[in-house]
Amino acid sequence: MHAVAVDEQGRLRSQVAILPEDLSVCGQTLRIGYLGTVSSHPRARGEGHMKALMNLCLEELCKLYDMVVLYGQRQRYEYFGFTLGGVKFKYTVGDANVRHSLKQVDDKGLSFLPLFEVEGAEAFAHKLNAARLAYVHRELQQLPYILTTLYQQALGVLDNGKLIGYFLVNDTGDEISEIAMENTGDISRAIKAYMAHIGKGRVVIYAPEYETSLNAALGSFAEDFVIETSDMYNIYDFANVLKAYLTLKHKTTGLAAGEFSAVMDGQPVTARVDASGVAVERSAKPGAVILSKEQAQTLLLTQHGRYMPVPAPAGWFPLPIFWYKVDKF
């Protein structure tokens, strides 16, 4: 995983790590590299080691992956071709929301336990993740480690002792980074029970745009929600990423029929949406707009693409790219 820079004495000066991830989106597999542990020794900063390592890694990664993902300071990684974007919904739920909007919701019998204290939890959590329209493949045997990445805690949701879902929460319990329920009709019940369980006056919940049942449930009672960015992205294969995420958006929140054609970072692409679904070709129509990598990623990944003078169908962009916290490092 790691590429390192060492000095003449063999001492570590800088390091970068790449975690290979298979991302399934509506049945299409994208090859993803998640980039992390970008760091330099305090006494080696300013010597150019990190820049050299990043350029070396990215030169190789462009041959292997459809996209590379990371989270970090925006301008630092823009130098390496990354764009801050994606779509993350952030909901705030308070006691008053539960007391008034969920007063008729029956949460009797629901309880919470550390997920992996429940028999069969690994297989259950693996099944729920793989049932999503978009998900990073998680190794079954590694789930107890994966679901505690970045200080997360996995809580099983039980109904009269039977496992029906799980929450991933932070160490104080007032932030839920992931909700997975076997039956989406149990989402509101589980949130009501969790608010009583944790004893906090306010909880923040994150969700991808394409989880329509989750967003419908949370939107019916949450105090507020905002749309935030979800990490930084460096797209190497625009056709593959477009096909996957336009299909996802078409199947969930919906897309207007239309056509978009462009040459993005030298890659000709034409996408069409009609009654038969989404089609993407590796060719561009005569007169298609020519976009640099930065321009193409701004259009595809950010809310600011709407201000660009680009003939794209309304509502197609930004693509609903989202990364769960435990799939990072």
Image (tube, rainbow, N blue to C red):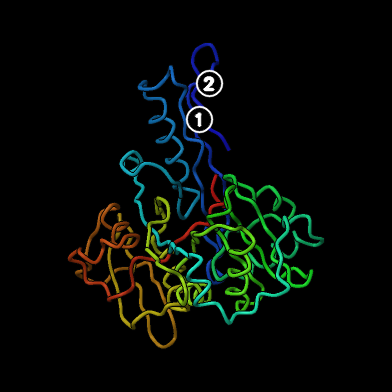
Disc 2 + disc 1, Cβ < 8 Å: yes
Check the picture and name the quadrant holding the C terminus: top right
Q: In the image, what residue type sits under mark 2?
A: Leu
Distance from the alpha carbon under mark 2 to that under mark 1: 8 Å
Residue 194's mark? Answer: none
Q: Residues within 10 Å of mark 1 (few under 14, many from 20)?
A: many
Q: Quadrant of residue 316?
A: bottom left
Above or below, 204 relative to 62: below
Q: Is residue 188 left or right of residue 268?
A: right
Disc 2 is placed on an element classified as strand
Front position in the image: 195 or 288: 195
Residue shown at 42% from the left, 56% from the top: 230
Which mark is drawn over residue 12?
Answer: 2
Residue at 26% in and 63% down: 305
Give, as a three-letter code, the residue at label 1: Gln
Location of the N terminus (image quadrant) = top right
What residue lies at 69% left-to-right and 67% top-to-bottom? 127
- At x 55%, y 71%, the residue is 133
